[in-house]
Image (cartoon, grey):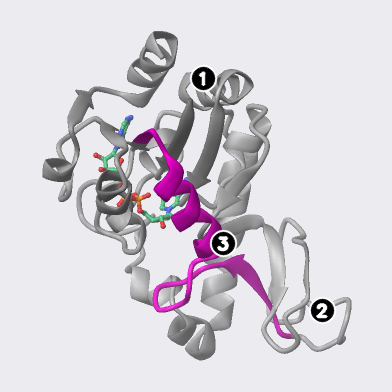
Amino acid sequence: MRIVVLTGAGISAESGLRTFRAGDGLWEEHRLEDVATPEAYASDPSLVHRFYNARRSATSQAQPNAAHHALAALQQQHDLTLVTQNVDDLHERAGSTQLIHMHGELAQALCASCGHRWSSPAEMDVTTTCPSCRKATARPDIVWFGEMPYHMENIWKALENAEIFAAIGTSGQVYPAAGFVQHARRNGAHCIELNIDPTAVSRDFHEHIIGPATETVPEWVKEL
Ligand code: NAD
């Protein structure tokens, strides 16, 4: 079966990584526009580096949970395109391959001057230099608000061919990911939302499985 799964911060919540829309709309005490935009990086790069250094450290201490493992197992049995909005590496550490990180990854650094990418050190700061052009313009390889998500052409194509589309632990408030359900549905996919709560786009799905991802995802994968 051809399946596209989109995951969001909710799948990593039970691994101890905080989502950002849960209560107060802050991500680890920060307003998103202060840490996750090109404007924030231009005006206070040290703060942005400190924020992502802390996210990298939290991720390295977290472990993949039963939901990450279930999706890695699903890939063994079906033609699965796994798309994540998460910047952590818990899907990879659970064994998923051919993973699309549409919003970039904490594990990668990007040179804001020449576009070179390399494995990020655990900590970056304003003196971190690009190994290619030697300028001190290293930034996390994260797609910030206002920037274009990665691999969109491949994602739209996979959605057009999908028989099943599932969105797991994502609030449906960040576009273009929030529009994937409509695209998949228009092209004939059966659409399922797995979330602990209803979301902004719940009405676009054919089916809803409500509950914590560590319980609902392994159960759903077993039924498939
Ligand atoms: P979001 O924070 O906007 O929404 C999280 C969603 O997960 C909510 O709908 C919530 O109801 C649901 N949820 C919470 N706990 C759950 C659980 N245990 N089981 C199932 N569902 C649960 O997240 P988003 O939609 O992914 O958008 C957030 C953006 O923030 C992404 O672009 C991502 O790059 C970034 N982000 C990433 C991480 C990470 O990499 N772990 C963490 C926070 C934010």
**What residue span does the magenta drawing correspond to?**
137-165
Give, as a three-letter code, the residue at label 1.
Answer: Ala
Give, as a three-letter code, the residue at label 3.
Answer: His
Q: Position of residue 212 (x, y in %)?
A: 30, 23
- The quadrant in which residue 49 appears is bottom right
Say which element carries label 2: loop
The residue pinned by badge 3 equals 151
User: Is-magenta flag for residue 146?
Assistant: yes
Q: In this rendering, would 211 be left or right of 154?
A: left
Q: Which mark is residue 130?
A: 2
Give, as a three-letter code, the residue at label 2.
Answer: Cys
Q: Are marks 1 and 2 in contact (CB under 8 Å)?
A: no
User: Is-magenta flag for residue 23?
Assistant: no
Q: Is mark 3 within 8 Å of ligand 1?
A: no
Q: Residue at x 70, y 73 (%)?
A: 110
Q: In this rendering, would 6 be left or right of 54?
A: left
Give the mark, 2 or 3, whose residue is nearer the N terminus. Answer: 2
Look at the picture and state if 106 lies above or below 38: above
Q: Which mark is residue 121?
A: none
Give the mark, 3 or 1, whose residue is nearer the N terminus. Answer: 1
